[in-house]
Image (cartoon, helix red, strand yellow):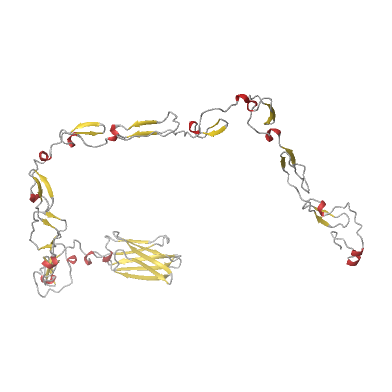
Amino acid sequence: MSDLNNLYYDSNMADNLATVSTRDTNLAEVYDAKDGMVYRDAETREIKIGTMPIIKSTIITLGFNSTYTIAKGYHNGDTIVKTQSLADATFATATADDIAENKTAWVNGVLLVGTLDINKNSTTGTATADDILENKTAWVNNIFITGKIPVNVTIQKKLNAGESYTIPYGLEGGSSIITAESLANQTAGTATAADIANNKIAWVNGIQLLGTAKPLLDMISDATATANEIRLNYTAYVKFGMVTGAMPEYVNQPKKTLLCGESFTVPHGYHDGTYIIQADSLLNQTKATATADDIRRTKTAWVNGILIEGTMIQTIAPGTDATATEFDISIGKTAWVNEELITGICPYDMVSFSAVRDNLYDITMPVIITIPEHKWETVSLIYVSVMNSTTHAVLYNYTYNNVIVENDFIEKDGDDTIISMITVLGSPKITVTSFVPDTYIRVIASGYTLLRG
């Protein structure tokens, strides 16, 4: 199937060159169509794209004697070519009074007839540039003159006592002000009559003061210091005049060490604050060789700076080897143990304890056992069994001896946690929790006795 967009014909170049084109000159070519417009050739049926330039719409204003050539291409009919108005072309500032009488001129598009009497337009005069304000102009004797007299800016000036100000040459507008600074501002001070010598006059804050201060000798007549009360080589005025200090000085003194019972009197004079008095260490003052075994029991002594409580048995009873402690002996009772007389402190008789608990009724809850007092160190045995909640078969068994407060036991099977058993400080309870699904716990605790302390 042939392409409708192409025209098939004999393309023998020799024939084409030998044959004179018979194409109708009225048929549109690419330059006859708007740029970018697509059309089909009327003869060949080819699709072609126009190249005729598209001229942008604008407004052209022509000045006088100027021309405008319309550009080749497509115009959409919005371009406007106009001429400048006569008013714009003849813009000027003259009036009829500025034009010689009966002479004509165009001003802002209007033809004016002059009314100026040139016989009265004489420029005879005596002024010079120094008689005319700066930037102002005038005609004098047919010469155009620009003035030189400056126009002074407004000033606000304050003068202190003894100062002056020269008004510059030029035109003053009458708004400048020159004032004298107030006496109060020029005599600012803090002195009072008592600070000024007696019968002397001074100005303070604009006020004249008559001094009432006593003469120096009168002011120091009641001084009581002596040379020994003034630092060495420093001077001061006292009632007898200027004196040079003779007070002893203690500067850069070495450290002074005091033994127990010694004292040191700080001497009279000036101290620079670096003089250190230090008590000797207890270690240096308690050199000794005794140990706790060399000091009677319950007695104390200092040895090489350390307070030692004696452990030496006060009374010896040979042949009393035993294992009891004061916790194993009834309160107020005495016994000899290991050659030492011991007084019992246990307020209880022997107490036995045994408890069996399980959580079969609710396997999601832990098992909690409570003893009479929170002394878990007195329970000799805790036995924990993890059992199947359906068959009641024992899956795991754990035995604990001498459990103490704040134990936290975690039992595992590989990476899997089986149970935890926790005791808490200040609580008489122990909590056992199972982490194996579909199991319950049975806990047995026994052997509780306060006398085992």
In the picture, which quadrant includes the C terminus? bottom left
In this picture, residue 106 sits left or right of residue 27: left
Q: Position of residue 222 (x, y in %)?
A: 8, 40
* Residue found 77% across the figure and 52% down from its top: 35
Quarter holding residue 97: top right
Q: Nearer the viewer, residue 20 or 24?
A: 20
Quarter holding residue 442: bottom left
In this picture, residue 99 sits left or right of residue 217: right
Is 92 placed above or below 335 here?
A: above
In this picture, residue 363 sits left or right of residue 92: left
In the picture, which quadrant includes the N terminus? bottom right
In this picture, residue 400 sits left or right of residue 40: left
Q: Nearer the viewer, residue 118 or 369?
A: 118
Numbered disc total: 0
Q: Position of residue 159 (x, y in %)?
A: 33, 34
Quarter holding residue 386: bottom left
Q: Position of residue 175 (x, y in %)?
A: 42, 29
**Is residue 12 among the parts visible in the rendering?**
no
Is 373 placed above or below 70 here?
A: below
Q: Nearer the viewer, residue 59 or 229?
A: 59
Q: Nearer the viewer, residue 298 or 373?
A: 298
Q: Position of residue 402 (x, y in %)?
A: 28, 68
Q: Work out which residue is located at the far bottom of the displayed protein and give it.
A: 319
* Residue found 71% across the figure and 33% down from its top: 86
**Is residue 210 among the parts visible in the rendering?**
yes
